[in-house]
Image: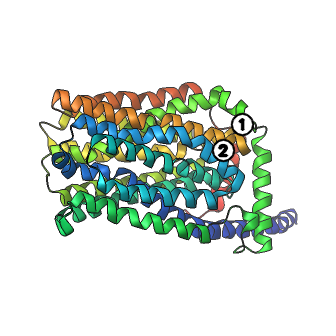
């Protein structure tokens, strides 16, 4: 009798949970594919310089140092404008902010086809950073308006895996354009890359204004019951997390924010080096055809995307974030170091290690973004997330510049890879030193949700 009564009282709770899962599934199918397309376009327009380099350096007579500075100066503009952009998003909404960002970076990408001097190259890469600033942390903030903390790592992983899909698509696409369009209309292949990959972003910016919804309460594609379920679930999550900082200035002075910056700096150092010099490593391994280079990088990024999703999902199901971030980062660092060891005498092993490095480094990124959300909320989250991303992404300037300089002066990419590996390995040390383990309550909630979620 007692067992039957207990079972009967559980039925409404189970039914409510099922309805909530169905609601989040609907939200995911509505938001994630579109955001992933935008991130693919953003990533392609940001890193296509790594493929264009294979032709444009010789044609424009740019040195490796000029290329490294130009590739990295993007992150200076990114750094300067990230926090203002995210605060603007908090004020006017994600729809207008993301539409503005997408439209302007597409225009700047197209303008890259007209580069003729190092100065013009630097200016456009800087402006690309200014225009794109706020997109990545803006989407991270935007998703916190829709999902509670125990669902976010998986969602972040899905969204960020689009950068891997961009690698899968962008590499072969850039290689095919450079090989097939070279000389058409008197333009080089690298110029066609910037033109044909910039136009879709301009169109996507216009579509964003019509498609995106700022918050659950404004979602006409959810029923009133679904809106109420999500709002109640988000309120429950806010209460469970306890006190979090809401004040903007206080969040910028919070030691935990700067600890997160140090950790993410180490990861971004590796990610930037792999992004901008991965094609060069493949070429050094003996594969000189741009299309072949693109397909090899495509395979590596496909594996990286799978790592992002699987690692984020497992982190959500266990409620554990710090080791799910630190261990993959350390694996990525070790693989980068071995890439430098094998690049001269064992190129096939070097390519395998390059793939492992991409998988490890990319798998750490979505789980990392669980960490600041545990102590920041509201406007403080808008400012804190943007500050973490903008300052840490200064590594995106330093890593390519250092890699270009060391390659030019040593004749090999190995020294730069070893330096990058050492920096990324420090991420695990910092995580163990500064990031506390998940609370028992967070673990309990994660396990409870995992128990009824399909494997």
For residue 172, what is the image quadrant?
A: bottom left
Q: Nearer the viewer, residue 379 or 122?
A: 122
Q: Where residue 382 is drawn, which disc sits there?
A: 2
| In the image: residue 202, left or right of residue 344 | right
> Is 209 rendered above or below residue 449?
below
Q: Nearer the viewer, residue 85 or 44?
A: 85
Label 1 – label 2 distance at C-alpha: 8 Å
Circle nearer the N terminus (1, 2): 1
Q: Where's residue 221, x and y in %? A: 69, 75
Rendered residue at 14%/51% (across/down): 287
Rendered residue at 21%/62% (across/down): 187
Rendered residue at 69%/53% (across/down): 148
Q: Are marks 1 and 2 in contact (CB under 8 Å)?
A: yes
Mark 1 = which residue? Answer: 248
The 10 Å Cα crowd at callout 1, few under 14, some 14 to 19, many 20 or more, is some
> Could you tell me if residue 330 is visible in this image?
no
For residue 26, what is the image quadrant?
A: bottom right
């Amino acid at each position: 009798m007692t067992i039957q009564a207990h079972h009967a009282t559980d039925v409404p709770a189970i039914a409510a949970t099922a309805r909530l899962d169905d609601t989040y599934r609907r939200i995911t199918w509505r938001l994630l594919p579109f955001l992933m397309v935008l991130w693919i376009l953003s990533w392609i327009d940001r890193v296509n310089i790594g493929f264009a380099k294979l032709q444009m350096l010789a044609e424009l007579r740019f040195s490796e140092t000029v290329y490294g500075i130009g590739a990295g100066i993007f992150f200076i503009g990114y750094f300067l404008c990230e926090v203002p952009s995210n605060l603007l998003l908090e004020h006017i909404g994600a729809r207008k902010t993301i539409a503005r960002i997408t439209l302007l970076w597409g225009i700047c990408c197209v303008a890259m086809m007209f580069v003729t001097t190092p100065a013009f190259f630097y200016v456009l890469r800087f402006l690309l950073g200014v225009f794109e600033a706020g997109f990545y942390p803006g989407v991270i903030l935007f998703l916190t308006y829709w999902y509670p903390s125990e669902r976010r790592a998986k969602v972040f992983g899905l969204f960020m895996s689009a950068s891997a899909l961009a690698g899968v698509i962008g590499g072969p696409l850039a290689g095919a354009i450079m090989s097939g369009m070279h000389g058409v209309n008197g333009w080089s292949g690298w110029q066609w890359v910037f033109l044909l990959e910039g136009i879709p972003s301009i169109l996507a910016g216009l579509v964003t204004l019509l498609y995106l919804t700022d918050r659950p309460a404004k979602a006409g594609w959810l029923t009133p019951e679904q809106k109420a379920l999500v709002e109640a679930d988000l309120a429950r999550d806010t209460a469970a997390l306890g006190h979090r900082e809401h004040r903007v200035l206080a969040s910028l002075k919070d030691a935990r924010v700067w600890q997160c910056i140090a950790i993410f700096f180490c990861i971004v150092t590796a990610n930037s080096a792999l992004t901008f010099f991965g094609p060069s490593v493949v070429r050094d391994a003996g594969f000189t055809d741009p299309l072949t280079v693109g397909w090899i990088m495509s395979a590596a990024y496909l594996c990286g995307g799978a790592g992002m999703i699987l690692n984020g999902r497992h982190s959500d199901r266990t409620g554990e974030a710090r080791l799910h971030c630190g261990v993959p980062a350390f694996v990525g660092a070790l693989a980068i170091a071995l890439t430098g060891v094998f690049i001269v005498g064992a190129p096939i092993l070097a390519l395998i290690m390059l793939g492992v490095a991409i998988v490890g480094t990319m798998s750490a990124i979505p789980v990392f973004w669980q960490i600041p959300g545990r102590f920041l909320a509201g406007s403080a989250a808008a400012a804190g997330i943007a500050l973490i991303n903008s300052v840490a992404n200064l590594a995106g300037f330093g890593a390519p510049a250092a890699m270009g300089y060391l390659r030019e002066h040593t004749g090999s990419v190995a020294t730069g890879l070893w330096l990058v590996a050492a920096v990324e390995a420090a991420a695990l040390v910092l995580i163990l030193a500064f990031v506390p383990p998940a609370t028992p309550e967070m673990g309990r909630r994660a396990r409870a949700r995992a128990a009824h979620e399909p494997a």
